[in-house]
Image (cartoon, rainbow, N blue to C red):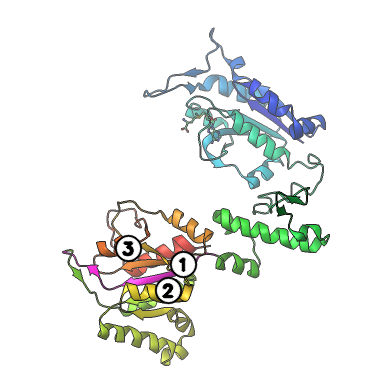
Amino acid sequence: MVNFTVISLFPAMFESPLDHSILKKAQGKGLISVRLVDPRQYTTDRHRTTDDYPYGGGQGMVLKPEPLVAAIEDVKSKLSRPKVILLSPQGRVFNQTLAAALANEEELVLICGRYEGVDERVKAFIDDELSIGDYTLSGGEPAAVVVIDAVTRLIPGVLGNAMSAGEESFSDGLLEYPQYTRPEEFRGTKVPDVLLSGDHERVRQWRRRMSVQLTGQRRPDLIGKVDLSPEEKDRIYSRRAPIYVALLHHPVYDKNKQVVTTAVTNMDIHDIARSGRTFGISGFYVITPVKALQRLALKIIDHWEHGYGSRYNTTRKEALALARVKDTLDDVLIDLERECGKKPLIVVTSARPGGRRTSFTELKDMVINTTHPFLILLGTGWGLTETIISQSDYALEAIEGCTDYNHLSVRSAAAIILDRLLRR
Ligand SMILES: C[S@@+](CC[C@H](N)C(=O)[O-])C[C@H]1O[C@@H](n2cnc3c(N)ncnc32)[C@H](O)[C@@H]1O
């Protein structure tokens, strides 16, 4: 059983949520209790003031510390081992794991802020701050209802079927599989056959597969934390769009913004191929129209692919198997159209901030949710030319460090970009 005590200036806001469905039943069965405490009862002035102007000026009012702390102390003095939580957008973000931990507490005291929030000194009297998400509510009351609801569902005996809380979204770190009920066919769409098969093991497997797939597509932030079997990992991470990387040695700018051709380097070929292999890209192009430089690049690749290097270091051989050499970007596009059956979407990169740029998060989302190939173009010298940039579909945001020095080597930039886009 969990006893909730809610400290709120608007106790009436809890009447309806507590008087329906699961929360009502849980109270009826004695599995939870909810006591509402109004801090106004703890004011000492004639006007029963609970808020005041912020020191330092600014909009709105702030909840005064005296009535709130008096309420907290009074409530605490009557409870054994209470956990006092302030609902606040600055708190830890509430989730299923925190809900499960709170369901093991006996006494939870939830404090609802209002206006511009509570006086900072109140925080010395609480155990934790919880936020229900990255948005601002007008008060802590809806957040307290969310916490009470999520915690109550996890108290044994609250939900009719003991299994149902355990199978929901987030219970195992995954989103829940799709649910169907009667009729068997609705407006032309049938319930998946497996659900009608009566074969419990097949149903279980289908549900697990759908949960993993859905979580991978919709919540890549969650999937990395889930225990997946090797087959599930394969399925999830190989479903994304194929990614190709091209290192352009011409046309690029020099420091005077003249269009030049830069030299091919051994280290770039090795390191970008190794990062590419680590993050599962499908191919790495070195683009240079200079025949002597092409021969150099091919010699390096050949040494590791077929020569002594291939026997000396097999993992290097594996990485350099991704490397290909082409004259121009157009040749790469033709090659990829042949390989993928469609033109790749071109993503240009630049160290210079500014312009309309696609964020890493946006691009990662696209990579996860499509199967269309992407070609990431890396520049050399002083960067990709306007002509190349004008041919692109997306311009990726610049990597920014935490100083005004921004001179990463192209191979470091490649590793960072691949990590941000493709890491599990
Ligand atoms: C308008 S908000 C105050 C916001 C505060 N000025 C800030 O920017 O952090 C008033 C009260 O609503 C509650 N609240 C607002 N958003 C919340 C959230 N995302 N999670 C939990 N409580 C929230 C808190 O109790 C907060 O003190």
Which residue is identified by label 2? Answer: 336
Three-letter code for the amino acid on which mark 1 is drawn:
Pro
Name the secondary structure under disc 2: helix
Mark 1 or mark 3, which is nearer the start of the sequence? 1
Q: Nearer the viewer, residue 368 or 9?
A: 368
Q: Amino acid at mark 2?
A: Leu
**Callout 2–callout 3 Cβ contact below 8 Å:** no
Q: Position of residue 177 (x, y in %)?
A: 69, 54
Q: Is the residue marked by circle 3 packed among few (<14), some (14-19), or many (20+) residues within 10 Å?
A: few
Position of residue 205 measured from the top left corner of the image (x, y, whole percent): 74, 63
Q: Is mark 1 within 8 Å of ligand 1?
A: no
C-beta proximity under 8 Å, tags 2 and 1: yes
Q: Secondary structure at mark 1?
A: loop
Residue 134 percent across, percent down from the top left = 51, 40
In 3D space, how far apart are the residues under numbered discs 2 and 3 (Cα atoms)? 16 Å
Name which residue lies at 76% across and 35% down: 22
SS for dot 3: loop
Q: Amino acid at mark 3?
A: Gln
Magenta stretch: includes residue 249: yes
* Magenta residue span: 240-256
Q: CA distance from mark 3 to mark 1?
A: 16 Å
Which sits earlier in the primary sequence, circle 2 or circle 3? 2
Q: Disc number at residue 391?
A: 3
- Can residue 193 be seen here? The reply is yes
Is 142 left or right of 318, judged from the image as shown?
right
Residue 349: percent from the left, percent from the top? Answer: 34, 62
* Residue under label 1: 373
Gap in angstroms between the C-alphas marked 2 and 1 = 9 Å
Residue at (55% x, 42% y) in the render: 92
Left or right of 62: which side holds 287? left
